[in-house]
Structures are given as structure tokens and as C-alpha cells.
Image: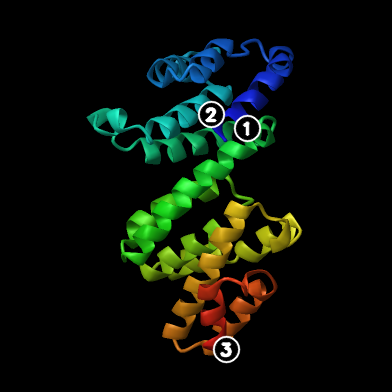
Amino acid sequence: MMRSYVLAAIAFLPCLAQAQKQPYEDLLVRYVDEKYEDCLGKAFMYTEKESTKKDPLPFLYVSMCYYEMSKIDKYRAMEEYKKADRDAVKYAEKYRKKDKNKEFFDNYADYWSELNTLAQDAGLNDYEANSFSKAKQWFDGMTGYYPENPGPWLMLGLTMLKSNLVKEGEAAIAKFQPAIDAAGGIGMLPDDQKKLVKSALIHYATYLDSKGNKAKAKDMLEIGKDFFMEDPEFKGTYESY
């Protein structure tokens, strides 16, 4: 899948050359050649250089390099890269802050899907292990680089509620349904986002039930009924109310 967004980047290169002074061919070549550490160092130079530090693409390359390095044992064993997965999310956030109008964002859809999968799996694992502060970091990061993605808002809110940050948690949860509506409904979401929505609805319903609000728990599950009833976990949870 990595190759698909690399090819998208290559196809988009002529547009970059017209859109900005620095098209970053050097980063692209290093990335395609899987010279991630070299690409990372060069990308960091651009993020600090006065003439390019406001450009979003170097930050995106930093994120993509960290993501790839997080999957390679050699790098994970190195002290400076042992948190490459979190750094991938961190720099994705920095990228999105500089690409507020999504000038480049949609050209990297496959990357966002892969990064979503990494972050949401890690966040759910931490949540289910009752490590709510760690889970919060993952879901907060996801809302930073992809605020249109509904599931992280609900899970972020849950981690806050579990940490007794009630006001902040409710504010995050309030962004869940509008994000679904803006996407055109759950059925229009990419598969990775649907997966997190399903898990988030189950976890939130369980939380509401634990607080004695069984009716609202059922209402939340109704949101996913038409999409997730073939999933045994969702069906079992739905039928328990």
C-alpha cells in the first residue's frame, strides 16, 4: 500500500513544482529508495530553514519516514527511534496545521489509512489496558491530523471521561456525530474509520451502561446498527441492551 501513495506523490510532483518554489524531489527520491533516515534528516533541515519552515510537505515526509521506521526492527532498537510510531503521529499533526486547506492531504489517502490503523490500534490497546492517559495521546493526535475522522473524537472523549475530565470529554464527544454527518454517514467512511467507529460505539455504550444510562447506551449503538450487526462483538453488545 505504501507504493500507492508514493506513486501518487510522484504523479503530483509537477503540480508541486508549480505550486511552490521547492518541490522536494530530493525527499521523494530518498523516500522511494527507502533511505528513511537520510530522508528524515533532510526533511528536518527543511522544517528549520527560514525559507521552507512554513511548507507542509517536509513535515509530512518526516511523519511518513517515522512511520516506515517504526516497522523496522533495526530502528525500533535505537534509542532515538524507539518512539517512531508516536513521532509519526506527532509530525502528521504538525503537517496538518500547515496544510489547513488540505492542499496536499487528499493525495495521501492511503498513508492516512495506514497511520490511522497504527494509531487507533495502539490507542484501543491502551484504553482496554486502562492506560487512559496513553490512549488519550493517540486519539488526540488522530483528531489533530485528521479532524474529519469521527471515531477518534468519541474515543478521545472517553479517555477524558475516564480521567475525570468531564467537560473536555463531553466537548470531544460532541464532535463525533457532526463528523459522521459531514462524511455523509458511516457508510461513506473508509474501512479503517468504520472499524474505529464500531469499537468506539461499543466502548462508549459500555461506559454509559456502567454509569446506569442503559437507554443512552442503546441509542448510541443504534447509530451503528445498520452497518455493524454482522460483527459478532457489536451484535452481542447491541442485543445485551
Q: CA distance from mark 2 to mark 3?
A: 43 Å
Instruction: Answer yes or no: is residue 150 visible.
Output: no
The residue shown at (58%, 31%) is: 98
Mark 1 surroundings within 10 Å by alpha-carbon count, few (fewer than 14), some (14 through 19), many (20 or more):
some
Q: Secondary structure at mark 3?
A: helix
Q: Which mark is residue 40?
A: none
Q: Which quarter of the figure has residue 17? A: top right
Q: Which residue is mark 1?
A: 99
The amino acid pointed to by label 3 is Ala
Q: Position of residue 59 (x, y in %)?
A: 51, 27
Left or right placement of residue 85 versus residue 183 in this view: left
Q: Amino acid at mark 2?
A: Leu
Q: Residue at x 42, y 84 (%)?
A: 210
Residue at 45% from the left image edge and 20% from the top image edge: 34
Q: What quarter of the picture does the N terminus occupy?
A: top right
Of tags 1 and 3, which is closer to the observer? 3
Place of residue 192 in the rendered image (x, y in percent of width and height, measured from the top left): 58, 52
Binning the other alpha carbons within 10 Å of mark 3 as few (below 14), some (14 to 19) or many (20 upward) gives few
Front-most of 151 and 98? 151
Going from N to C along the chain, the mark reached first, 2 or 3, is 2
Q: Which residue matches tag 3?
A: 215
Residue 37 vertical position relative to residue 226 in the rendered view, above or below: above
Quadrant of res 187: bottom right
Residue at numbered disc 2: 60
Q: Earlier in the sequence, mark 2 or mark 1?
A: 2
Residue placed at 64% from the left, 24% from the top? 7
In whole angstroms, how far apart are the C-alphas of marks 2 and 1? 10 Å
Residue 174 versus residue 66 in the image, above or below: below
Up-down: is 6 above or below 221? Answer: above
> Label 1 to label 3, Cα distance in Å?
41 Å
Q: Quick one: 142 or 107, which is closer to the camera?
A: 107
Q: Are discs 2 and 1 less than 8 Å apart at CB?
A: yes
